[in-house]
Amino acid sequence: MGYEAGQIFEYTLGLFGGLAQHPDYVRALMERGPVPDEAERERRLEARVERTRSILRRETPPQMWVEVSEGPSTLVRDNQNPHLDVLGFPTRAWADFLSGIREN
């Protein structure tokens, strides 16, 4: 799916989508999954990391937005500006921002 996409919108509850998953997050999920062999989990993790890199580091990577809402703040990671790391917004401010985008 993501190899040729220009934009990716993914809405999930409870889990980050694949391209937004940090390797430590993937590792923690896999430890609770059906693959008991640690070496096999690491092999799969490396394959996922490489896939993510190949998509996000291509000449024209897709635009991707990740929204995570938890309590009084919303955290957003923007792959177009990775130097910004994770941006935090008060939940109300983020909702107002999204409403403004939808109106345009």
Image (tube, rainbow, N blue to C red):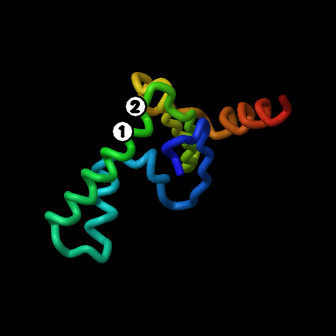
SS assignment at label 2: loop
Residue 19 rendering spot, x and y as whole percentages: 45, 46
- Spatial CA distance of label 2 from label 1 is 5 Å
Q: Residue at x 49, y 35 (%)?
A: 77
Residue 86 rendering spot, x and y as whole percentages: 45, 33
Query: Quadrant where the C terminus lies?
Result: top right
Which residue is disc 1 drawn over? 53
Which residue is disc 2 drawn over? 57
Q: Residue at x 47, y 32 (%)?
A: 79
Q: Can you tell which quarter of the image residue 97 is in?
A: top right
Rate crowding at label 1 as few (under 14), some (14 to 19) or many (20 or more) other CA atoms within 10 Å.
few
Q: Identify which amino acid the numbered label 1 is placed on.
A: Arg
In the rendered image, the vertical position of residue 54 relative to residue 42, given as above or below: above
Q: Is residue 73 left or right of residue 51?
A: right
Q: Nearer the viewer, residue 46 or 95?
A: 46
Q: Is residue 61 visible?
A: yes
SS assignment at label 1: helix
Q: Nearer the viewer, residue 65 or 98?
A: 65
